[in-house]
Amino acid sequence: MKPRYLGKHNPPSRIFSLDRISRKESRKDLNKFESFGLDIWNAYEFSYLLNGKPKIIVLEISIPSNSKYTIESKSMKLFLNSFFDKTYSKQAEVINILTERISKKCNSEVKIVVKTSYKTFESDKFTNAAGLLVYEGFRSICPVTSQPDWGNIYLYSSTNTLNKKEIFDFLFSLRNHGGFHENCIEKTFLYVKETFSVDHLEICGRFFRRGGIDINPIRSTQKKLFFENFREFNQ
């Protein structure tokens, strides 16, 4: 990918296109296993004009993990920010435009909803689950800007046979790994699948926000996902 916006000075403009990133190379090894999942983008600062009056809402953008392309994050931020002075008579109108544009760029069916609240990790579904591991303070490096990315990693297995120390040592080894959020989660998914005997595995990365957006990849061996779009305190 040759980024148009990321790592570059962007002059003032009100028209931004979306840059896409091919998943072909990153999913090459993942194709050894049948996998499912989503990349959930929470955009906390989306603003537009509703009948001429400023409105700010929170968007949940869900991109399928098997989409042909995903979106480069800075171009997404600039694209969403370019709506701040555009007027619509109904909120559904702007959501439909966003959905159509992002879906077309990803060559996949992207879903966008307006969020008014979030569950937290403290919900019974998570805290009472057997086979759940939580790694706090995950760090990796943006492969373009070389800036650190932070987050927490959640692993769920139905058999509860994962070796916590070995997995945490692996995650710690990625502290200087240059990879996007999706790559880090897929790399971990592959490592666990190839190292341990586990029937069902699901890994969720809750990464901290940048520019008003956090990206949260989920990779699973089952279509019905265990993790949902909960909210971390420091997100």
Image (spheres, rainbow, N blue to C red):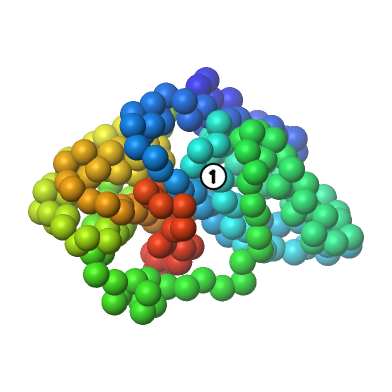
> Given the current orientation, which residue lies at the most extreme top position?
2
Residue in the image at 37% along x and 74% along y: 125
Q: Nearer the viewer, residue 55 or 154?
A: 154
- Residue 42 image position (x, y, % from top left): 54, 56
Is residue 122 placed above or below 199 in the rendered structure? below
Q: Nearer the viewer, residue 221 or 99?
A: 221
Rendered location of residue 202, percent (x, y)? 34, 53
Residue 131: percent from left, percent from top: 23, 64
Label 1 sits on what residue type? Pro
Coordinates of residue 27 in the picture (x, y in percent): 41, 31
The C terminus is located in which quarter? bottom left
Q: Splitting the image into 4 quarters, where does residue 82 fall?
A: top right
Q: Residue at x 62, y 72 (%)?
A: 116
> Circle 1 sits on which residue?
64
Q: 235 and 54: which one is in front? A: 235
Which residue occupies the foreground of this view, 166 or 55?
A: 166
Q: Does residue 113 appear anywhere in the picture?
A: yes
Which residue sits at x=40%, y=43%?
35
**Residue drawn 40% across the image and 66% down it:** 232
Rendered view: 128 above or below 40: below
- Identify the residue at the far front of this view: 199
Residue 205 seen in the current view: no
